[in-house]
Amino acid sequence: MEIRKSKLPVLAPHADQDDIDAVSDVLKSGWWGKGPKVSEFEKKFAEMVGAKYAVAVTSASIGQDLVFKALGIKNVDVISPTMSFMTTAAVPLWNDCTSTLVDINVEDFNISLESVKANISKETKAMIVVNYAGVPANIRGIREIFDGFILEDCAHSCYTEGAGLQGDAAVWSFQAVKTMPTGDGGMITTDDAELYEKLLPLTWLGISSTYSRFANTNDNLVPKPGLAWDYDVEVLGYKAYMIDLTAALGLTQLKKLPANLAWRRHVQSEYNSKLHPDITRPVWSDTVQMYTARINSELREKFMEYLSSKNIHTSVHYKPLHLHPINKNQKALFPNADKEWPRMVTLPCHNGMTQQDIDYVIYWANTFFEERN
């Protein structure tokens, strides 16, 4: 097979004219900050998830941090899985907590209930539970042994049916290579009215949004003298609100999400049925945020270099968090993560791929192993 001229990315966003038009409409509207598009996006996203409340923010990382700050989670022990992006270890540290990492399941790379049981203590007051690659974690099992706060990390779960409803709150990601990309951005969802009310002022330095003070005037956003400009700051907040330019992309991506997920699942099905038997398939995912295959650890670097020579980009998701110097001195043991992560390799899977791209990856991935036999 002829080698392609351009690199096929492992993850990538995909936009069409609807996305361009949506952003263009906001640019022409003159209202680029937090406004009607953000409100619409929050409402529609909450409806999709089945949550009562949604707060749009600048990133999922900031969303997790705001939840901790709204609830006053500080100076306690927080458990999270070692197989995750750095956010889940950093957020507890940002809030002067102990970040306790635990092991994963071999099958789905989600948090191990057995490892949680072995490392939970009376100081553990919160957990961040990640749905790795969109596969639901065993939050129900954790509930049986832990009655503290559970934040469901749904960065990979947009949208897996039932995701975001198992924890006390959930945080979602719209980062550039997620299933519903907006460049960056996140959403907090919850059924807790008190948490929701605490979150709102935290997104903008304790100030009510400009749009909320203008919206009750008229369609031209003309303020009533002496009312719209005035506000009082009662809590220390942060600058973390989403803007309409971002929300406009979120709304168009939300409309296309079912079709986009269907295509990602098609890529997954093609890989599952056609890849070489020496490539271990991941657990089925409804979002296929990553297609994390496993091969012989001694072959991984050679395999990745081989595919790179064919202009196929691969990656590893993730290097376990306990191996980073910032997370040293962990008390848990990580036999599953230590064994499995050297075998992990992420193959391309995104909406921009064509059938020809899928076939191209399968051909060269299989050729690598066939040439070794």
Image (cartoon, rainbow, N blue to C red):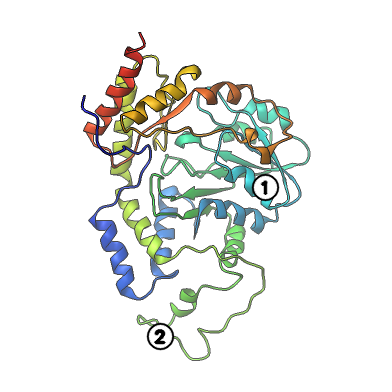
Judge by depth and name the residue closer to the eye, 42 or 172: 172
From this view, report whether residue 189 is shown above or below residue 352: below
Q: Which residue carries the number 1 mark?
A: 92
Q: Is residue 84 left or right of residue 26?
A: right
Image label count: 2
- Callout 2 crowding tier (Cα within 10 Å): few <14, some 14–19, many ≥20: few
> Which amino acid type is marked by label 1?
Pro
Q: Position of residue 368 (x, y in %)?
A: 34, 18
Residue drawn at (52%, 54%) of the image: 188
From this view, report whether residue 299 is shown above or below residue 169: above
| Quadrant location, the N terminus | top left
| Quadrant location, the C terminus | top left
Label 2 sits on a secondary structure element that is loop
Residue drawn at (49%, 34%) of the image: 317
- Callout 1 crowding tier (Cα within 10 Å): few <14, some 14–19, many ≥20: many
**Extreme bottom residue here?**
225
Label 1 sits on a secondary structure element that is helix
User: Mark 2 or mark 1, which is nearer the start of the sequence?
Assistant: 1
Q: Position of residue 350 (x, y in %)?
A: 33, 39
Q: Position of residue 210 (x, y in %)?
A: 49, 76
Q: Quadrant of residue 42?
A: bottom left
Q: Please tell me whether mark 1 or mark 2 is closer to you in this view.
A: 1
> Which amino acid type is marked by label 2?
Val
Q: Quadrant of residue 217?
A: bottom left
Q: Is residue 263 left or right of residue 134?
A: left
Q: Is residue 219 left or right of residue 96?
A: left
Q: Position of residue 272 (x, y in %)?
A: 34, 23
Q: CA distance from mark 1 to mark 2?
A: 43 Å
Residue 200 has which mark? none
Residue 222 has which mark? 2
Residues tagged 1 and 2 counted as in contact (Cβ below 8 A): no
